[in-house]
Image (spheres, rainbow, N blue to C red):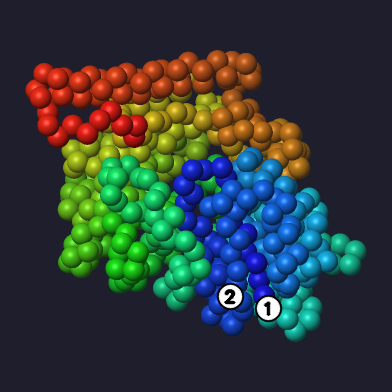
Amino acid sequence: MRILLIVYDNDSYIHTFPQGIAYISSALLNAGHTVDIYSQDIHHYPEEHLTAHIEAGNYDVVGLSFIGGYYQYRKAIKISEAVNKARKHFKYYILGGHGPSPEPEFFIRKLNADIVVIGEGEETIVDLMQALERGDNLVNVAGIAFRGVFDIFRNEKRKQIKDVDLIPWPAYHLFDINYYRLLRQPHCTNSDFVMPILSGRGCPFRCNFCYRMDEGFRPRSNTSIIEEMEYLKAKHGITYIEFTDELLMSSKQRTIEFCNELINSGLNLKWSCNGRLNFASRDVLQRMKEAGCKFINYGIESYNDDILKVMNKALTTKQIREGIENTLDAGISPGFNMIFGNIGETREHLNNSVDFLIEYDDGAQLRTIRPVTPYPGSALYYKAIEDGLLGGPEDFYENKHLNSDLLAVNFTPMTDDEFYSCLYDANETLLYNYENRRKQSIGKQLEGLYKNKNADFRGFRQT
């Protein structure tokens, strides 16, 4: 089969390497198929260009994967219109990713697609291509929804891949790594080259706002991770690794063992990851620092014990405070992720989060607080439907989820106007705090240059 996979443009200056598509590409190549990558992201091609590309390509399959954001939804509509204009020139239009997976019937109808691959796709896509190539009945392909003659069918769920080390690495050779490695991360220098890696799949926790559909956590072996890091350093000059999976810090033991092996490898790479504050002990963080960790992104979400219980965070404010202090003491920058608007939240709860952010902010990132969004697939999404606050996927995407910084569903005791007043005050405080820190930094540069005659100064540069 001849397959075109679309990497859509999200209007970024430098885009993140499309790991999901790269993994699917590798699975398809290993199964003997031909894969072309349409890089709308790099070139900012208009949708008309995609139509012409498909018409000239003689493809069997066109594939698009996207997450459940408001921007991605509207972008998927535009791309699908362009794809469907070239319908005579290919056979099947397939969707995948966190966006279509929870509500595949809606997206098949909305985007005039033929098939949705639900959840983890490496095994599903290979089985699906085989069935399409042979002309087999698709009812026997686990992990998909598809358009029949009169209706849309959702097949049985596919079992997760147990041993993630058996999943082939992303097909790096199909992508312009010289472009993607220019992505910036906290505490990387202008001479660093950055690439993302997965250290595992899934998460052992189950927050009520999370739309991740796979259950549990499946780590890669340390050997496999380090081999991929070695490859990226040797082949593409990568000096900084961003671990993009939900949770590298899945336990204290796993984190320390990984760091020990990374130190012993002698790779000497910088890296960042997502972490859990209940595992952020001093010994773990010190080892992470020694292994090259520069930044840990923490999902704090709220600085109130009652709301943390509502979220099912399995975290306390005591653990949060101790973990952040330990992280800062180790010389690692923490990322503070906070959201507002979960069930029963009030202005007082929000103020607790703001006060905490101000107290411990080290200036590594600009942080604001967004409303919680009940994405399809999350427990909050189904509660919103059950409580009559949401009418389903079309209501969510067409009427409610218009912007990630705007309220989609109000789960609080406040009116919408009161809710926005709270967020206005909170983010005004956070933004002004960030700008004041920038002014202080500029003041130190001025003093160093003109009062201390700092000869290492290289100009007032935007960072």
In the image, residue 144 sits, relative to residue 207, either above or below, namely below
Would residue 287 appear left or right of 49 to someone viewing this image? left
Q: Is residue 460 visible?
A: yes
Q: Is residue 9 above or below residue 141?
A: above
Q: Please indicate, yes or no, whether residue 304 appears anywhere in the rendered image.
A: no
Residue at 56%, 42% (x, y): give it.
11
Q: Contact (CB < 8 A) between labels 2 and 1?
A: yes
As drawn, is 262 to the left or to the right of 109? left
257 w.r.t. 183: above or below: below
- Outermost residue, left direction? 452
| Label 2 environment density (alpha carbons within 10 Å; few <14, some 14–19, many ≥20) | many
Q: Name the residue beneath numbered marker 1.
A: 1
- Identify the residue position indicated by label 2 in the image: 28
Of the image marks 2 and 1, the number of the one nearer the N terminus: 1
Residue kind at label 1, given as amino acid type: Met
Counting labels gives 2
Q: Position of residue 297 (x, y in %)?
A: 36, 43
Estimate the x, y position of residue 40 in percent, counting from the top left: 60, 53
Q: Is residue 183 left or right of residue 226?
A: right
Residue located at (73% from left, 48% from top) = 77
Q: Nearer the viewer, residue 248 or 36?
A: 36
